[in-house]
Image (cartoon, helix red, strand yellow):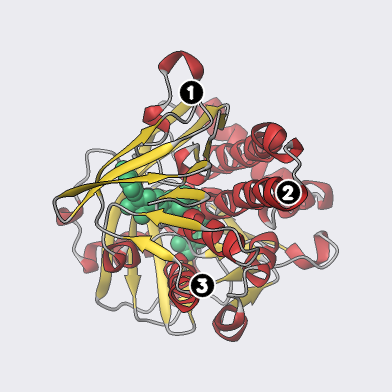
Amino acid sequence: MRTQVAIIGAGPAGLLLGQLLSRQGIDNVIIERKSGDYVLSRIRAGVLEQGMVQMLEEAGVAERLHREGLVHDGFSLAFDGRRHRIDLKGLTGGKTVTVYGQTEVTHDLMVAREGIGATTIYEADDVVLHDFDGASPRVSFVKDGVRTELACDFIAGCDGFHGVSRRSVPEGAIQEFERVYPFGWLGVLADVPPAAHELVYASAERGFALCSMRSATRSRYYVQVSLDEEVEDWSDERFFDELRRRLPEDVAAAVTVGPSIEKSIAPLRSFVAEPMRFGRLFLAGDAAHIVPPTGAKGLNLAASDIHYLSQSLIEHYRDRSDTGIATYSQRALARIWKAERFSWWMTGLLHKFPANTPFEQRMQRAEFDHIANSTVGSAGVAENYVGLPY
Ligand code: FAS
Ligand code: PHB
């Protein structure tokens, strides 16, 4: 087999890259470890920056997003029961975010890919990257018990944090930066109307909680839990009781309890691998970086990586220019680190850290009070939340 760009991973990064390249006539093959149904079954992000919405419009897959997505002009921070609204639209000159699940984004990209007849090899085992430091990279994998080889010009490692791409880079060629947080998020998806019409990020003595949503009839809730918690120990009743104890009274009173259709615990970490290019191998999305979900940046960073990478590859094939390829890592990392900072800062502001002294707890409260009483303070939060320019 041969293609121009081999893409490892059929998550949002891989599918979006494939769609953008195909629309420019650049041949690409996606190799995915799991089945398409499994990829769609993962419940993850829910908030899209304006830049990501524009990327999906460029990819020709934004029609359902504009029909079903919820445009949000703001969100609230709550601290010990006091609520402060961040007026995204007013503080950023009109920018907004769109609530639309990652599952839906992935579905729309899958449907579009099937529609153009591009090749996605699902349930590919033992994927191996070969010779990406030379001029003739290859990817081999086992499908239905047969090892197959795919020759290509470039490899895009879009295979997530636990993928094979980053692990294929020689140890001395890559530098990793990491912070693991001493807690996780227990998330619940339930077909009940949201407790508030916008997102509410709440910090309370008992810990952090988040009220989000997928639609006017489907809510997404999270509570901070310690790392030794097991999801089996959390009945729906226990979850909703804990959630309401962490929310401002008016929001808690508006929570509709209902059976969970998904319940899981996600660990929180900040992680960046530098650089993101190794010869003819490029890392993009979670394969290169992870943020705690507090700032709603993970999925959106994958999109901005793909903005830079797709541009670079299109320039290579269309304009015979390799300037984009040579500067991909530097340009992507410049935006990644700013999103890492915002996600780390927002996580530090809103969560209960076991090791925090009373002084640090006062610092959290003072930070919230500054934001709640300062237009400039609130504007700093708003410009990061809607997404910094690409
Ligand atoms: P993905 O991990 O989505 O996709 C990688 C793909 O590569 C997967 O389909 C995987 O099966 C495949 N793969 C892995 N190894 C392979 C191999 N060896 N060969 C072939 N294929 C392989 N972000 C937010 O913005 N908000 C959130 O609320 C949020 N919540 C999250 C909750 C959880 C539990 C997790 C894990 C992440 C969450 N994220 C959130 C971040 C998440 O949305 C990611 O940023 C997003 O999925 C990144 O997309 P990709 O880079 O495509 O990686
Ligand atoms: C979600 O809806 O899943 C969500 C929203 C905002 C976040 C994290 C998760 O910061």
Asked if disc 3 and disc 1 are in contact, CB closer than 8 Å, the reply is no
Q: CA distance from mark 1 to mark 2?
A: 29 Å
Q: Is residue 302 above or below residue 259?
A: above
**What residue did someone put label 3 on?**
250
- Measured from the top left, where is residue 91 in percent x and y? 81, 60
Q: Residue type at mark 2?
A: Glu
Sequence-wise, the earlier of marks 1 and 2 is 1
Residue 208 image label:
none
Asked if disc 1 and disc 2 are in contact, CB closer than 8 Å, the reply is no
Q: Nearer the viewer, mark 1 or mark 2?
A: 2
Q: Residue type at mark 1?
A: Glu
Residue depicted at x 65% and y 45%: 368
Q: Residue type at mark 3?
A: Asp
- Measured from the top left, where is residue 62 in percent x and y? 61, 76
**What residue did someone put label 1 on?**
176
- Measured from the top left, where is residue 84 in percent x and y? 66, 59
Residue 315 image label:
2
- Measured from the top left, where is residue 255 in percent x and y? 41, 75
Q: Is residue 1 above or below residue 55?
A: above
